[in-house]
């Protein structure tokens, strides 16, 4: 960082490097890290299994970053005329099952995805989960069949083609129909190819499918920090990737989790000093008077631009590969920003399941579970209220993913349940704020006919307690149900002091008028009348709102 510091206040010539972030994902032991090593020319401070446990076990436990550069491809030269070279930044994501939250955190900074599959084993559990994340967050995927050196050379071509045909069937039901596939060996396998097989073919394919990235340099600066370390006598370096906006040397930035503001002293991109970075760039940022132990992974941002909250409303879609029940009032692992935090989910939807833009002034039906989008439920008609167990710091419009990471990792089931985008941030302890959400459950009270007054009026029982103030329920709509008929009506008022009430039907109900016990009746006629009336129900349907701030006991809204 000394070179960057020296040029701190002077505008420096643009680096003329066009950066594309490529996520390298796959099942544990698929050879991702070896593939990245074979491709990489420059290693960053967070590259290639720096974690001691990774080195011991031979698996990736954290995101690793490295890069290589190639000439600008012909098909990009018009759009990339201001750049000299194309740089692929490789993000080596962990494949270990219990660390899927790290994959999700990494996926949010990736432009395109390489899915590494062990050609000798095919699709495995974490392969499928990486595919789910790819479907949620990526538009482009490249399949790399690794370890072809483990197949005898005389049967290699036949075996690889067979695996490719099988994978084409798997991907036919995804958004990545007919994906590009390249068969390689990251470690070679012979004296003639010690550096790997077909690595040059893979590089050519990456160049061929690359597209000029759409970068948004306006708006608040948001920088994903994946590594932090001190430099004696200089300060603290935060390495990471710009997710949005841009920043220059001497700008003020904030560590939202710590609520600390720092001035940028210098910036480097892969050991080269620069004066400015923008969305998509990978860089190291030097600040002073920051204890590196306070932050290992987190964010830097424009001061005041990243809120902290304990609840959000988000649009939501169920992952079709998840086969369990996605129930309301259940706890899920929610990955948002670069945190994974437990939250209780309350799903809700349009009563008619039609797609719509969320409107906080409208009423929504609470769902027992999240429904799969399809014939009975259109995409864009469901939302979720997430109540976090602790305060979260993330951009207001963050992408989020809900998972059940406690599921047995050997169960061979997808643990990613849903995904969505934050719409509104809230404080779950602020009752007035939550009461703005008009989330309701349909409820019913069922009473019975006690006596028939005339062709329109009946006396009802069993809806209210003796002490209930029935005046509060006057004019509420009811339905008089008798055999196969349902007749509309309303509560006209109380009758006596024992919780009985008067109901008026809006059309003749057809019930015989009650004449009183034993008056001019044949033996057993009273019992027959009581039986007939007992079969008639008075149904009071209403909405129970989850966050009713009136605190009015017994309040009913229809």
Image (cartoon, rainbow, N blue to C red):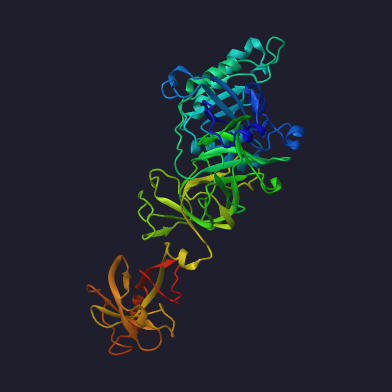
> Residue 437: x, y in percent?
43, 62
Image quadrant for the N terminus? top right
> Residue 452: x, y in percent?
29, 81
| In this rendering, position of residue 546 left or right of residue 51 | left
Residue 305 visible? The answer is: yes
At x 39%, y 75%, the residue is 447
| In this rendering, position of residue 139 left or right of residue 38 | left
> Residue 195: x, y in percent?
68, 16
- What is the number of callouts on the image? 0
Q: Residue furthest right?
A: 56
Residue 271 lies in quadrant = top right
Up/down of 64 relative to 185, above or below: below
Front-most of residues 297 and 355: 297
At x 75%, y 32%, the residue is 55
> Residue 169: x, y in percent?
50, 26
Residue 30 visible? The answer is: no
Image quadrant for the C terminus? bottom left
| In this rendering, position of residue 40 left or right of residue 399 | right
Residue 250 lies in quadrant = top right
């Amino acid at each position: 960082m000394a070179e960057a510091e020296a040029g701190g206040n002077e505008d420096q010539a643009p680096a003329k490097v066009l950066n594309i972030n490529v996520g390298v994902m796959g099942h544990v032991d698929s050879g991702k890290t070896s593939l990245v090593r074979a491709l990489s020319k420059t290693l960053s401070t967070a590259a290639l299994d720096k974690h001691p446990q990774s080195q011991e076990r031979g698996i990736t436990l954290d995101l690793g970053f490295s890069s290589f550069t190639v000439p600008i491809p012909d098909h990009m030269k018009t759009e990339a005329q201001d750049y000299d070279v194309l740089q692929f930044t490789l993000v080596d994501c962990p494949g270990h099952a219990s660390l899927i939250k790290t994959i999700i955190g990494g996926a949010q900074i990736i432009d395109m995805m390489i899915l590494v599959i062990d050609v000798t084993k095919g699709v495995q559990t974490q392969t499928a989960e990486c595919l789910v994340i790819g479907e949620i967050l990526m538009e482009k995927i490249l399949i790399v069949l690794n370890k072809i050196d483990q197949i005898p050379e005389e049967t290699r071509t036949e075996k690889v083609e067979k695996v490719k045909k099988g994978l084409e069937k798997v991907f036919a039901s995804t958004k990545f129909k007919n994906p590009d596939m390249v068969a390689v060996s990251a470690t070679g396998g012979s004296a003639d190819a010690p550096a790997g097989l077909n690595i040059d073919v893979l590089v050519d394919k990456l160049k061929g499918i690359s597209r000029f990235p759409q970068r948004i340099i306006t708006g608040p600066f948001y920088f994903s920090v994946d590594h932090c370390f001190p430099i004696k006598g200089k300060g603290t370096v935060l390495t990471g990737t710009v997710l949005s906006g841009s920043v220059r040397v001497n700008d003020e930035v904030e560590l939202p989790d710590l609520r600390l503001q720092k001035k940028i002293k210098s910036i480097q991109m892969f050991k080269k000093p620069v004066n400015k970075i923008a969305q998509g760039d990978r860089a190291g940022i030097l600040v002073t008077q920051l204890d590196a132990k306070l932050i290992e992974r987190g964010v830097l941002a424009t001061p005041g631009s990243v809120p902290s909250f304990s609840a959000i409303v988000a649009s939501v879609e169920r992952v079709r590969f998840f086969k369990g029940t996605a129930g309301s009032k259940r706890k899920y692992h929610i990955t948002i920003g670069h945190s994974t935090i437990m939250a209780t989910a309350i799903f809700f939807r349009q009563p008619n399941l039609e797609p719509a833009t969320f409107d906080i002034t409208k009423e929504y039906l609470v769902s027992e579970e999240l429904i799969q989008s399809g014939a009975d439920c259109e995409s864009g008609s469901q939302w979720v209220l997430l109540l976090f167990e602790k305060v979260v710091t993330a951009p207001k419009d963050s992408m989020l993913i809900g998972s059940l990471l406690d599921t047995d990792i050997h169960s061979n089931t997808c643990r990613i349940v849903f995904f969505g985008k934050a719409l509104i941030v809230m404080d779950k302890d602020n009752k007035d704020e939550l009461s703005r959400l008009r989330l309701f459950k349909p409820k019913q009270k069922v009473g019975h006919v006690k006596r028939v007054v005339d062709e329109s009026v009946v006396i009802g029982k069993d809806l209210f307690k003796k002490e209930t103030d029935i005046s509060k329920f006057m004019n509420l709509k009811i339905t008089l149900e008798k055999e196969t008929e349902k007749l509309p009506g309303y509560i006209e008022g109380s009758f006596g002091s024992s919780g009985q009430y008067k109901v008026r039907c809006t059309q003749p109900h057809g019930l015989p008028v009650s004449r009183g016990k034993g008056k001019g009746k044949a033996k057993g006629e009273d019992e027959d009348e009581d039986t007939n009336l007992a079969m008639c129900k008075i149904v009071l349907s209403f909405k129970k709102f989850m966050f009713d701030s009136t605190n009015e006991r017994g309040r009913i809204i229809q």
